[in-house]
């Protein structure tokens, strides 16, 4: 008889990973879609990150884009989360930047050692005037 | 500015891509074209203010896809064909050495490749025709630089037949080719030797002429490339952009424009 030696199942896996950084980002992506009636949605894309400074410990970049389906899937990069594949924290956040500049001169706006500081940094970025202005522009272009 | 209008008209240009356009009087330019019966639109949404600008003839469907600091991506639809057009402007050698610029090119290529995949994934899911990519702009790297021809960069090669094979094996992965037609314009004895001229090479090499401005094509577009229309432009009307065997940058631009046609 088949016997699972794993400790998890799909339900526990979903519950437990929801509170990890990738899960939190995904949740915000879903909320963006809900709050805009599907006019905008969030998409995350993972990329290898090769910083020039060997002291920078991150080697995975998760790009958070806002996508506008009605503008032929135009996308705007809202933030980039830098992490290590093997650990949840620390992570770093940059906004209004890009992987090229970050690889060359890594100066993140936020370095987060735990969930609390990650949520704080993320909240500050998502509620910033510039992000909201850009969301309004995209929503307006998509709807009218 | 008047030269920009003239060059667009006399070369029957449909898409005009300009770097360092911060001081360009867009309205004057568009109005100058309009007076000559050409209706162009500036395509942008949330520009990153780095001077990359694209103007498209209204007869073409050009949609903005992504605006970044070092490139802007557009979807171009024409006669049922679909192109993903990346317009780029890399950092100048005045500010960064070759190895830093190569690193940037490698990173940029990975970004572009991700975008191509994401874009075509949607098309495949909906059973639509795929986009083929063109990357054009001021790379501030020569065609033989690691960032352009290297397998970790654009993998953009000079051999059209080899490029048509699509990719090369590297380790356990297949790395897709770009085709770089600029090799066929570089250093011609009866033509212009490059798109940029400089007497003080950062590494004391005696190039003088550099082919920093390039157009790279995915191999599927090689047969659509119109060779007779491909050139580095050296004259606008009766005005020459070259003086004393150098680019006449004091009067025009420090780069020469490239003209090309697909399809």
Image (tube, coloured by chain):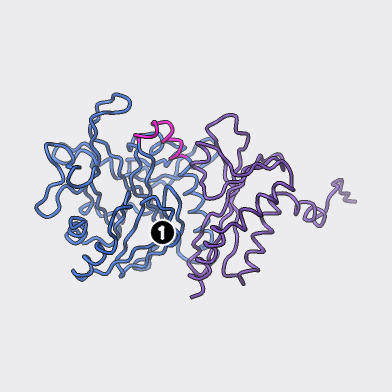
Chain colours: A purple, B blue
Asked if residue B26 is among those painted magenta in the image, a careful observer would answer no
Residue A143: image location, x then y, percent: 51, 74
Taking the spot 76% from the left edge, 52% from the top edge, the residue there is A19
Q: Main secondary structure of the magenta part?
A: helix
Q: Give the image quarter of residue B254.
A: top left
Residue B178: image location, x then y, percent: 39, 46
Q: Which of B246 and A4 is in front in this view?
A: B246
Kindly give the residue lying farthest to the right in the view shown.
A1
Kindly give the residue lying farthest to the front in the view shown.
A129
Kindly give the residue lying farthest to the left in the view shown.
B238
Q: What element carries label 1?
A: strand
Quarter of the N terminus of chain B within the rendering:
bottom left
Residue B143: image location, x then y, percent: 33, 38
Q: Is residue B143 left or right of residue B84?
A: left
Question: Which residue does the numbered mark 1 point to in the structure image?
Answer: B74
Q: Is residue B6 left or right of residue B61?
A: left
Asked if residue B101 is among those painted magenta in the image, a careful observer would answer yes
Q: Mark 1 lies on which chain?
A: B
Q: Give the image quarter of residue B263.
A: bottom left
Q: Which of A106 and A61 is in front in this view?
A: A106
Q: Is residue B108 left or right of residue A39?
A: left
Residue B127: image location, x then y, percent: 51, 66
Taking the spot 70% from the left edge, 39% from the top edge, the residue there is A86
Q: Nearer the viewer, residue A24 or A85?
A: A24
Residue range highlighted in magenta: B93-106
Say few, some or many: other residues with alpha carbon within 10 Å of mark 1 (under 14 / 14 to 19 / 20 or more).
Answer: many
Taking the spot 86% from the left edge, 49% from the top edge, the residue there is A4
Kindly give the residue lying farthest to the top in the view shown.
B204
Taking the spot 52% from the left edge, 61% from the top edge, the residue there is A134
Does residue B116 lie above or below B191 as drawn? below
Q: Nearer the viewer, residue B28 or B248?
A: B28
């Amino acid at each position: 008889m088949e016997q699972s030696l794993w400790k998890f199942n799909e339900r526990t896996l979903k519950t437990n990973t929801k509170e990890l950084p990738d899960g939190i980002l995904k949740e915000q992506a879903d909320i963006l879609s809900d709050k805009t009636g599907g006019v905008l949605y969030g998409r995350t894309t993972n990329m290898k990150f090769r910083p020039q400074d060997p002291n920078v410990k991150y080697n995975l970049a998760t790009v958070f884009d806002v996508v506008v389906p009605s503008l032929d899937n135009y996308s705007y990069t809202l933030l980039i989360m830098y992490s290590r594949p093997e650990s949840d924290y620390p992570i770093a956040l940059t906004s209004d930047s890009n992987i090229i500049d970050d690889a060359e001169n890594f100066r993140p706006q936020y370095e987060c050692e735990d969930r609390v500081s990650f949520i704080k940094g993320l909240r500050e970025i998502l509620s910033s005037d510039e992000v909201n202005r850009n969301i309004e522009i995209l929503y307006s272009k998509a709807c009218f | 500015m008047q030269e920009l209008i003239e060059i667009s008209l006399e070369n029957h240009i449909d898409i005009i891509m300009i770097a360092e356009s911060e001081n360009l009087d867009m309205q004057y330019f568009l109005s100058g074209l309009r007076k000559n019966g050409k209706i162009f639109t500036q395509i942008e949404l949330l520009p990153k203010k780095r001077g990359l600008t694209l103007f498209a003839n209204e007869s073409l469907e050009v949609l903005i896809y992504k605006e970044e600091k070092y490139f802007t991506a557009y979807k171009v639809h024409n006669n049922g064909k679909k192109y993903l057009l990346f317009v780029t402007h890399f950092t100048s050698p005045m500010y960064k050495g070759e190895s830093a610029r190569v690193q940037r090119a490698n990173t940029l290529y990975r970004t572009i490749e991700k975008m191509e995949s994401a874009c075509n994934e949607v098309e495949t899911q909906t059973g639509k025709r795929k986009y083929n990519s063109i990357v054009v702009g001021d790379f501030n790297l020569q065609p033989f630089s690691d960032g352009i021809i290297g397998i970790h960069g654009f993998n953009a090669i000079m051999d059209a037949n080899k490029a048509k094979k699509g990719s090369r094996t590297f380790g356990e992965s297949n790395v897709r080719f770009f085709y770089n037609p600029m090799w066929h314009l570089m250093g011609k004895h009866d033509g212009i030797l490059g798109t940029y001229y400089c007497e003080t090479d950062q590494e004391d090499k005696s190039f003088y002429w550099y082919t920093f401005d390039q157009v790279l094509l995915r191999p599927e577009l090689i047969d659509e490339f119109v060779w007779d229309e491909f050139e580095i432009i050296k004259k606008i009307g009766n005005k020459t952009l070259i003086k004393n065997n150098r680019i006449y940058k004091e009067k025009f631009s420090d780069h020469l424009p490239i003209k090309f046609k697909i399809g």
